[in-house]
Amino acid sequence: MKDPATGEITEIHCTYDPETRSGQQTRKVKSTIHWVSAAEAIPIEVRLYDKLFTAENPNETPEGKDFTMHLNPKSLEVVQAKAEPSLASARPGGRYQFERTGYFCVDTSSTAERLVFNRTAELRDAWAKLQKRL
């Protein structure tokens, strides 16, 4: 259900079907909910890297402009997130797949008190999708 004033989701109705657990699927389902317990989650910093330029060839610019006009303002997004408690033992260089997001490695600046994960690859190539639409 959604809050009519804010549009935020306030309630979800679902059922648990143990026959559709990962690796034991005997039945196909439409969708799956992945979640992390807010009470047990640990705070992490996630760095989402993207293409540095918005153009395939940033040197191709209008007269009087330079390549900097093609810099992608979203080439780095830093997000504060919550993660599974098991990641508390993650060490620099460790590699993980975050469900439906991509592949990440633990940054060398990480500490036990401040875990930082860098995205190394997305699961889907959003850039190729965008180019098809243009």
Image: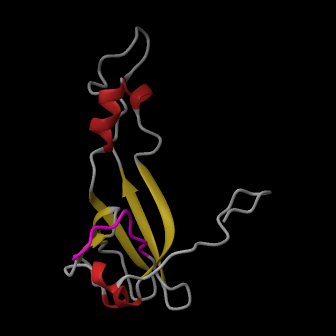
Residue furthest front as drawn: 27
Query: Residue 73's spot in the image, x, y percent?
Result: 47, 41
- Horizontally, residue 38 falls left or right of residue 99, namely right
Residue plotted at (49% across, 64% down): 79
Residue furthest right as drawn: 5
Residue plotted at (37% across, 32% down): 54
Query: Residue 56's spot in the image, x, y percent?
Result: 27, 27
- Horizontally, residue 17 falls left or right of residue 113, namely left
Image: 85 above or below 132: below
Residue furthest top as drawn: 63
Question: Which residue is more in the foreground, 125 or 58?
Answer: 125
Q: Quadrant of residue 65?
A: top left
Image: 102 above or below 117: above
Total label count? 0
Q: Which residues are magenta?
A: 26-34
- The answer, for residue 55, to whether it is visible in the render is no
Residue plotted at (77% across, 57% down): 4
Query: Residue 7's spot in the image, x, y percent?
Result: 70, 56
Question: Which residue is more in the foreground, 97 or 72?
Answer: 97
Query: Residue 83's spot in the image, x, y percent?
Result: 43, 80
Image: 90 above or below 14: below
- Horizontally, residue 93 falls left or right of residue 40, namely left
Task: Give the dominant element type of the magenta stretch: helix, strand or loop.
Answer: loop
Here the colouring is secondary structure
